[in-house]
Image (cartoon, rainbow, N blue to C red):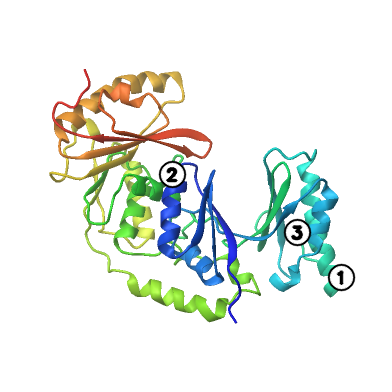
């Protein structure tokens, strides 16, 4: 008899909820419910394993194990103490409880966290005479408690390390994009494998890495492990080897792709080369050190997708106030026929570029509010 469908929640960067919903639907999820900074869905354990392996946009896959009303920390303890924790994982596994809250009436979230931890440890002590150890840095089992004004949700993390940690990239450079945000930019820019793609400010190469792996049909989770492999109630031995074999069989051999990366800084390009090599993608992407203001497109039509530099200090802002109009002029004069999708924390960017924007997509890079600006480039597209 198959177990009933379970309830899951995938956190994601704010602004990617819709494209994550589409991705989950393509993987077979049901009851898809976009929320702020994530998407809920239902499905079986096999689906959750597949989402961990295949999702390019989710940050984690959380398995909801309890939900209900609460008024006090004791209510949380009582509800958690009833759950069959020892059916889900072994007492030898290290544990951490993370708590998030929105309008919770409780005075101390630390005390709420402690009561959940106590309930889990007391369960194991009653069942087996011993309790799991706590590890706040690299726990093998992570429990998430979310509190709103009236209800709690308890979830087990099935991912382990965040899903944007793909297990291949050795170095990051200055504030690189997370891999799932880069994948989200590609999705929102409507890029598909085979469409020429240029990153004119490639930095550590995150967007190019993501595009190359998509082009070669590489599942993003093939080079890492997952927390669900430590959940004793999940049919991992029955299904996981088959999922891995199917994902491996889809991979295309590395080849030169219509992907180009540019940067003014040679050390940034070297970092991109190192990251491509670490992922086994040498020769897939063409790299060039060039000032974007002196660059030319590598082919007649394509997508220019870049995370633009933005100024934090006054000197940087003054530099960019001169650079952005020059960039807009370069794009208009040299890249006609292309579409530019520019990701920036400068919400006034279109005014500086003096180019017509057809879409502004609100996004967050961590806590930083950003926009993805879509700009079809045609001769004479500067605004007057």
Q: Is residue 152 above or below residue 221?
A: above
- Image quadrant of residue 289? top left
Looking at the image, residue 258 sits to the left or right of residue 48; the answer is left
Front tag of 1 and 3: 1
Q: How many marks?
A: 3
Q: Secondary structure at mark 2?
A: loop
Residue depicted at x 23% and y 39%: 339
Percent coordinates x, y for residue 147 in the rendering: 70, 46
Label 1 Cα crowd, 10 Å radius (few <14 / some 14-19 / many 20+): few
Query: Is disc 1 in contact with disc 2, using a CB cutoff of under 8 Å?
Result: no
Of the residues under marks 1 and 2, which one precedes in the sequence? 1
Q: Is residue 53 above or below residue 321?
A: below
Instruction: In the displayed orientation, state which residue is furthest to the front.
Output: 31
- The numbered dot on residue 126 is 1
Q: Secondary structure at mark 1?
A: helix
Residue depicted at x 34% and y 56%: 276
Percent coordinates x, y for residue 31 in the rendering: 52, 59
Q: Quadrant of the N terminus?
A: bottom right
Residue linked to disc 3: 134
Along the line of sight, which residue is nearer the eye, 191 or 222?
191
């Amino acid at each position: 008899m198959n177990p009933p469908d379970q309830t899951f929640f995938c956190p994601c960067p704010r602004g990617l909820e819709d494209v994550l919903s589409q991705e989950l639907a393509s993987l077979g999820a049901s009851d898809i419910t976009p929320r702020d900074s994530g998407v809920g869905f239902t499905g079986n354990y096999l689906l959750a394993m597949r989402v961990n392996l295949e999702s390019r946009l989710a940050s984690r896959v959380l398995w909801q194990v309890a939900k209900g009303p609460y008024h006090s920390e004791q209510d949380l303890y009582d509800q958690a103490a009833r759950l069959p924790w020892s059916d889900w994982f072994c007492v030898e596994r290290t544990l951490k409880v993370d708590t998030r809250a929105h309008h919770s009436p409780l005075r101390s979230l630390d005390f709420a966290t402690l009561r959940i931890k106590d309930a889990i440890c007391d369960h194991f002590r009653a069942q087996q005479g011993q309790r799991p150890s706590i590890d706040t840095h690299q726990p093998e089992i992570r429990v998430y408690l979310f509190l709103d004004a009236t209800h709690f949700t308890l979830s087990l993390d099935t991912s382990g390390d965040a899903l944007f940690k793909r297990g291949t990239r050795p170095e990051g450079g200055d504030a690189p994009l997370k891999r799932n945000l880069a994948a989200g930019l590609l999705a929102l820019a409507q890029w598909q494998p085979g469409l020429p793609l240029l990153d004119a400010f490639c930095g550590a190469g995150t967007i190019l890495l993501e595009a190359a792996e998509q082009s070669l049909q590489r599942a993003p989770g093939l080079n890492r492990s997952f927390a669900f492999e430590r959940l004793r109630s999940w049919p991992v031995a029955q299904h996981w080897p088959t999922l891995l074999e199917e994902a491996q069989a889809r991979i295309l051999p590395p080849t030169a792709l219509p992907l180009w990366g540019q940067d003014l800084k040679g050390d940034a390009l070297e970092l991109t080369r190192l990251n491509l090599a670490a992922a086994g993608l040498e020769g897939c992407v063409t790299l060039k050190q060039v000032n974007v203001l002196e660059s030319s497109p590598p082919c007649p039509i394509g997508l220019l997708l870049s995370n633009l530099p933005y100024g934090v200090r006054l000197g940087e802002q003054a530099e960019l106030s001169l650079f952005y109009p020059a960039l807009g002029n370069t794009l208009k004069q040299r890249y006609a026929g292309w579409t530019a999708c520019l990701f920036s924390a400068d919400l006034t960017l279109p005014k500086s570029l003096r180019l017509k924007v057809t879409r502004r997509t609100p996004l967050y890079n961590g806590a930083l509010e950003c926009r993805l600006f879509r700009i079809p480039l045609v001769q004479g597209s500067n605004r007057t």
